[in-house]
Image (spheres, rainbow, N blue to C red):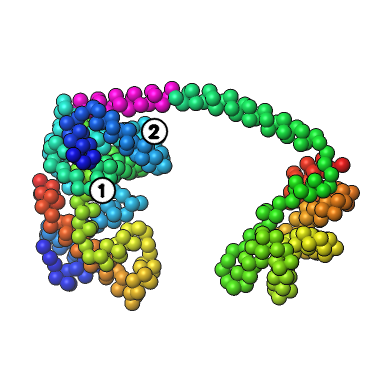
Amino acid sequence: MSNDAYFIEGLRSGKETVLQEIYDQFFSKVKTFVLQNKGTITDAEDVFHNALIQLYIRLKNRQLVIKSSFEAYLFTTCKNLWRRELNKKRVTKSNVVELEDKETENAYALLEQEQWELYIEKFQLLSENCRKVLTLLFGGTSYEEIVETFSYASKVVARQRVFKCKAKLTKLIKEDTKFSKIKKL
Amino acid sequence: MSFDDQTYSRIASYLNNEMNEAEKAAFEVQLENDAELASFVDTFSTLEGVYNEDKWTVKSNATIAEVKALANAFRADDVADVSKKIRAIQQHTTNQETTSRSRKSYFYYISSAVAIAAVCTLFYFSFMQSITADDAFEQYHDWASLPSFQTKSDTNNNLAKASTLFQEEKYQEALSIFTTYAQESATYNPQIQLYIGVSHMELENYQEALQTFNQLQNSNTVDDHKAYWYTALTYLKQNDAENAKKVLKTLVENPSNYNYEKAKELLKKLK
């Protein structure tokens, strides 16, 4: 059994020794990330706990197949959970947010994680050129710089290109059965 | 699902906010009647939030019913069991860390106390001991604090080259580049003058050094006050404590002068 399979099976069966190993091997990276992003150790512990629970449910009930390494999977889950927390803190200041119980919150977080993965997966199906253009755009690069990087004739041409790529991406996302299934429920 | 080119171009102008009021209203009516189009526009506008790390907002399409069902899954006994195990591991590790941390801090306090005592003793002795002008020069000259030049244009490259030569203690070569630069340049550059003065000092051309710093002192530039410090160093290097003290006394008349604290300290120590 590979290391990844070992961790995945151990988590799926809730084996204490494996959970301990997971914690020993992977917590420090999560801790560093949370601490560097306005969080405390307790936040990091909560994020790590919630991520493992989320993965546990997805493995048991939602046919999750981990394609990349277990570590990468666990880390992105933690990262997204923490970004979600930070957003909540930001939103609660201006909007009225319904208070949810812990389990409902966890359910939302899980669904959002699945949604996020779907988007990431579809992004990889774009042409190389589209991926490059959109990566720059979403990374905050201005249209002026994009025109320069790709030697487009003008900003109008760059905008058209961006629109085409985004439209293609939207189509890919919407065509996925997972997306439409959730949408039509 | 696909739209014709015209629809795509309308979607684009709608999303880019390029429509006038009438066009916008018409398009919004169309959105209300065409679920496919609406869902496309809706999904399209979520892209930014998912892929842009700074704006990161992911929303699920799930219905309330699905969220509720899933929340129930989180309430299951086996989940509670796994949760408890993880919390126990975390609790255990945190406790261990706190113990080792407190042990560490005990050691830390002792070692810092020792270190502080050592520094104090050292400081006391070095402070009380008076030094000769020669020693003072050795202790207080620090050419690393001279300004550095960025390498952008060709002329600045020359400066960078000169400061490298300077760092390699090739003062004669550095001096000739700096002097040429200063002569060719239309404006008086105090930073380059500092290098010229110090190079002269190192080459033991003390008259030229003093002259350079004197000019700097009268140059009415932001760096003119630095001239006091370097003039003092020039005297110290010649083992002339008397003149060095005179200059340092002038320096400490104004706390905003360059190396004011060092100058005060040095005045106390000099024989």
Most foreground residue, B212 or A164: B212
Task: Determine which residue is flagged by label 1.
Answer: B58
Observer able to see residue A135:
yes
Percent across and percent down for residue A146 are 35, 68
Q: Position of residue A20 (x, y in %)?
A: 28, 29
Q: Residue tagged by mark 2?
A: A41
Q: Check the image and name the residue furthest to the bottom.
A: A153
Q: Position of residue A114 (x, y in %)?
A: 20, 46
- Where is A159 relative to B250, above or below? below
Amino acid type of disc 2? Answer: Ile
How far apart marks 2 and 1 lie (CA) works out to 25 Å
C-beta proximity under 8 Å, tags 2 and 1: no
**Could you say whether the residue bearing mark 2 is in a helix, strand or loop?**
helix
User: Chain ID for label 1?
Assistant: B
Percent x, y for residue B253?
A: 82, 47
**Is residue B132 covered in magenta?**
no
- Residue under the image location 40 percent in, 42 percent down: A37
Front residue of B112 and B192: B112
With B23 as the anchor, is B131 left or right in this view? right
Relative to B12, say whether A104 is above or below: above
How many dots with numbers? 2
Which residue is situated farthest in the right direction here? B242
> Quick check: B180 above or below B46?
below
Give a yes or no on whether discs 2 and 1 share a subunit: no
Q: In the picture, residue A175 is in which quadrant?
A: bottom left
Kindly identify which numbered label has been placed on residue B215: none
Q: Is residue A34 visible from the viewing direction of this image?
A: no
Quadrant of the rendered image containing residue B148? bottom right
Q: Is residue B95 magenta?
A: yes
- Image quarter in which the N terminus of chain A is found: top left
Task: Read off the chain for label 2.
Answer: A
The span picked out in magenta is B80-99
